[in-house]
Amino acid sequence: QASHPADHDEDKKDLVVAAACCLRAEAAKNNILQTMGGEEAEMSESDMSEAADFDIATVDGPALTPQISGIVGLCITSFLWVIASWRLLYHYSGWCSKCCKRTKEDEEINHLRTDGLTTKRLLHGLLWTAMVVEGVAYADMVGTNSSNKLNYVLLDIIGRGILEFSTFVIGTVHWFNITSQARAGDKKLAFAIFPAILAILTIAVTVSSTFEAVTLLHGGYDTVHGFRSQSDIHRITLLVESVGWGIHAGIVAICGRMVYLRISSLPTFSQVRSHAKRNIITKMIIPMIFCALSYLLRSGWMAADFASRLVSPETTFEQGVGWWVGNCWVPTFIPSIMLLYSIRKRDREPGSIDGVPETLLQSPNAEMPADPFQSFQQTFRDFEDEDASLPSKK
């Protein structure tokens, strides 16, 4: 059909009106940008960093915003900080109360307390410090809603990389000290080798983490994501920490097995009912099992992240919900609770262990100087008391 001239004129008018509207909108936009001084025209460095965090690909589930991760982490660290503060004051109160007047009953109860810095007090102090450092990092994440250099250094490098590893190593050393006093026969060499291995691992993790912090702050990296995807020292630190946590898990498992074998080999242990046996063993072994599994979990996540960085540097494990749960929150919360439970000082009569009858800990040949279980009995009577090497019963 032939179009009418009036229809062409109407179409031309519509095009002119649309073009005029576009020109007016563009002019209004330019006026607004000029009025605001061009602040909306360019993104700041922090905005670019935040945008990069949400644009990266994750392979462990949906990426959590820094604010959400910070809120969850702040709740966990605050809870642990309160408990660590309470237990820290409790453990140091006996040491500091020497300057106060105490009754005769208090003296009888506190005569087993050890003065000075013990592994229990050191562990509580390190855990308290770690929770403070990580709490500051999480609070910064909540306030800025970004993953910046400050909270990365405090949380990933100093908090989890140095302080947490050192804290948990102190707990394992404490368990070995307790077990070593049981005279484990041909395994005496293990009580010197394993703590030495843990000391070497702690030094390696501390050194690699220190280099990572220096490289991030002074290496010319604009964003944390750019540092993670491009830095060789970050990959090295992932490898070192993965190996360190894995070996630590194995050592804790070995220590738990040694404790189990020593308890089950006591001559009087056969006199206890099966239900009581299970309770006795699980109360001593469960903290070690949970700690070993948590260390192994963190080691596995770091190994996976290291492999991912080699295969696809732009793909990360360090932003998804799986990373936060499997590498950050669970391996921090569970070992902390287990260690605080394991080394707590219980109100008890000297010579007993929470529900364990004294006849179980006594050997039928207790009067014999060569009794192989004599030191074991004395040691586990003080399992929940301060770090002290007490004289054997004669």
Image: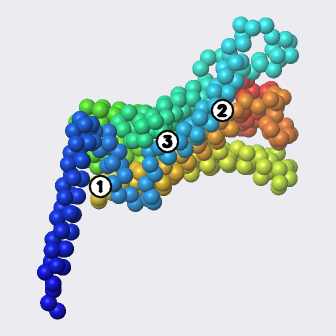
The image quarter containing residue 372 is: top right
Distance of label 1 from label 3 (alpha carbons)? 23 Å
Q: Quadrant of the N terminus?
A: bottom left
Q: Position of residue 112 (x, y in %)?
A: 75, 21
Out of 193 and 56, give the one closest to the viewer: 56
Q: Which residue is mark 3?
A: 70
Q: Nearer the viewer, mark 3 or mark 2?
A: 3
Q: Nearer the viewer, mark 1 or mark 3?
A: 3
Front position in the image: 240 or 222? 222
Please state if 342 lies on the left or on the right of 368 as rendered.
Answer: left
What kind of element bears circle 2? helix
Q: Judging from the image, what secondary structure is the residue with disc 3 in?
A: helix
Which residue is drawn at the image coordinates 15% and 86% (left, top)?
3
Q: Position of residue 24 (x, y in %)?
A: 21, 53
Amino acid carrying label 2: it is Ile
- Residue 360 is left or right of residue 344, and the answer is right
Distance between mark 3 and mark 2 Cα atoms: 20 Å
Q: Position of residue 216 (x, y in %)?
A: 30, 36
Q: Amino acid at mark 3?
A: Gly
Badge 2 local density, few (<14 within 10 Å), some, or many (20+)?
some
In the rendered structure, which amino acid carries the disc numbered 1?
Glu
The reply to whether the C-beta atoms of the residues labelled 1 and 3 are less than 8 Å apart is no
Q: On the image, numbered disc 1 is attached to which residue? A: 314
Q: Quadrant of residue 120?
A: top right
Give residue 54's position: percent from left, percent from top. Answer: 37, 52
Determine the residue located farthest toward the bottom in the rendered image: 1
Q: Which mark is residue 33?
A: none
Residue receiving disc 2: 83
N-terminal of the pair, mark 1 or mark 2, is: 2
